[in-house]
Amino acid sequence: MKTLRQVCLMGCLLLSLSHSSLATEATAQVRLTPGRLGLLAFMEMASEKLDLSVDASSLGGGTLETIMVPDSGPLTAERAKALVLTVLYLEGYTWIHDTATDIYRVVRQRDARDQELPLITESIQLPDSDLLVTYVMPLAHAPAESLARTFRSFMPANSRIVADEATNSVLISDSAHNISKLKKLFNSVIHRLIIL
């Protein structure tokens, strides 16, 4: 399992690199220090390199996974943040940005869904990352309760889907990547319902 996580991290870094190298505007670049790091050390490095205040006290000092950070070259700050979120996501954590104090608090995913998550109402606003968000998906051609019940099986344990029958929409709290995948599945099913 540890090897799979290292491969996933390396793939995410390579994707981040290719996205950042395609950027046309001049942006600040971040270079993550390559090597094997514990998750806490990785978060400390990310906090320093991205110039963010991060409270990673929930990680503790116990036996955390060791991750391999390959030499990926320079990344945009946005892609580096996305990489940090992916690393946290793979380890069962995420961060919640407290806008009042401008601190990113690292919390377990299962606890994060009960925190104040960014609310997204337009699919174009979904970030290209593993940021936990709540997405409001309006449905025009299908009953919200039925679809929410059906799609619960396709969602990770730490996510949440709730039908709002008054507006015929579903509210989904999950990573933006997972919501994007679920939205594609929703659209496919709804398209088939319309045809029938």
Image: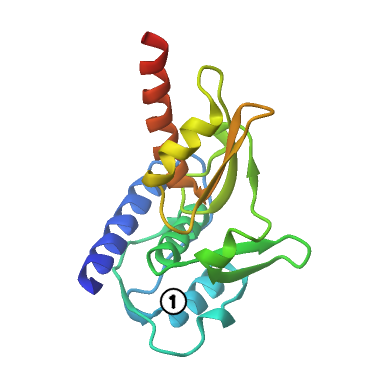
Q: Quadrant of the N terminus?
A: bottom left
Q: Quadrant of residue 115?
A: bottom right
Instruction: Give the x, y percent position of residue 38.
Output: 38, 82
Q: What element carries label 1?
A: helix
**Circle count:** 1
Q: Residue at x 51, y 81 (%)?
A: 59
In the rendered image of this protein, does residue 74 appear above or below residue 19? below
Residue 195 vs residue 117, the one in the foreground: 195
Instruction: Give the x, y percent position of residue 20.
Output: 41, 48
Q: In which quarter of the image is the C terminus?
A: top left
Q: Residue at x 42, y 39 (%)?
A: 151
- Residue type at mark 1 is Phe
Q: Residue furthest top?
A: 195
Q: Name the residue under label 1.
A: 42
Q: Residue furthest right?
A: 100
Instruction: Give the x, y percent position of residue 183.
Output: 45, 33
Is residue 104 left or right of 147 when viewed as pictured?
Answer: right
In the rendered image of this protein, does residue 175 appear above or below residue 123? below
